[in-house]
Amino acid sequence: MINLIGGVPLYVLEFGDELVYLTPYTITLFLLALTFTVLVLISRPEKQVDIAFGGDAYRTKEISVSEMRFRRFMAIACGLATMGAMVTGDIFNFTLFTAMVGITNVGIVAAVKSPHVQDAAYQYGLVSLSATIPLFGGAAVYAATTGSLSMIELMKGTLPAVPLIAKGMLMLGVIGEGMAPFYAAKAEMFRAPGAPYVIMCSLSSLLIFLRVVEVVMLG
């Protein structure tokens, strides 16, 4: 099944029990995350404009330098965590990177001085925190039933079959990090000014979801 989704591994780099492997699928996702992270690094944030309904009045929202630096740092950290999740070959590391993406998504908008945005970030933070329970629980079931967290070993098909409950918990944990239907908790966060930083919240969640689709097909 991995040959139908991710392709045959082109390169495997081992660090003791940890490993990184590259397939055409993971390389594509990694390059998407890398490209957008570079754009975040070199770009300047937009200036959001509020227009009064039924009139010509408008107001430009300015972003302070300190706020911009913090949000840029969190967006870059989010991009790095996303890139790590794209190429890791370890189930537990994948869950760690996914949790880091959720934390940095909150951090991207945490510095915005807007009650609506901060309230939305707080609500999303609660959802993201709750999602870590099935996320790490799924990884624990993977380890308990197969005796390994290596995606390469799962790919070989020599280990016991992964129970559906483990795959379901892993998928639920990723969905809770910002995919539908839990995306509603994140939607209000986009009232925060300063693209492309805010856009990283959506891109990271999308790439994580595309990767977990491949992961749950293993074993």
Image: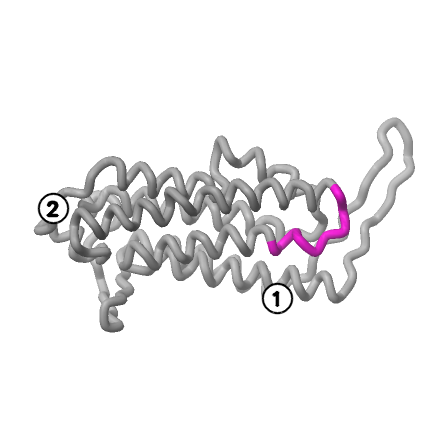
Q: Secondary structure at mark 2?
A: loop
Q: Mark 1 packing: few (<14 Cα in 10 Å), some, or many (20+)?
A: few
Residue 124 falls left or right of residue 136: right
Residue, x 26% and y 49% (percent of image)? 6
Residue 166 picture quarter:
top left
Q: Which mark is residue 62?
A: none
Residue, x 27% and y 43% (percent of image)? 216
Q: Residue 62 location in percent, x, y? A: 81, 55
Residue 29 falls left or right of residue 184: left
| Chain part drawn in magenta | 107-115
Residue 169 seen anywhere in this rendered image of the structure: yes
Q: Residue 205 location in percent, x, y? A: 47, 46
Compute the Cα span from label 1 to label 2. Answer: 47 Å
Residue, x 35% and y 55% (percent of image)? 94
Q: Residue furthest top?
A: 54
Q: Quadrant of the N terminus?
A: top left
Q: Quadrant of the C terminus?
A: top left
Q: How is the image coloured?
A: one colour
Residue type at mark 2 is Pro
Q: Which mark is residue 42?
A: 1
Q: Residue 206 location in percent, x, y? A: 45, 44
Q: First in sequence: mark 1 or mark 2?
A: 1
Count the numbered circles shown.
Answer: 2
Q: Residue 38 location in percent, x, y? A: 54, 64
Q: Residue furthest bottom?
A: 15
Q: Secondary structure at mark 1?
A: helix
Residue 7 falls left or right of residue 187: left
Residue, x 14% and y 42% (percent of image)? 161
Residue type at mark 1 is Ile
Residue 196 seen anywhere in this rendered image of the structure: no
Q: Which residue is mark 2?
A: 160
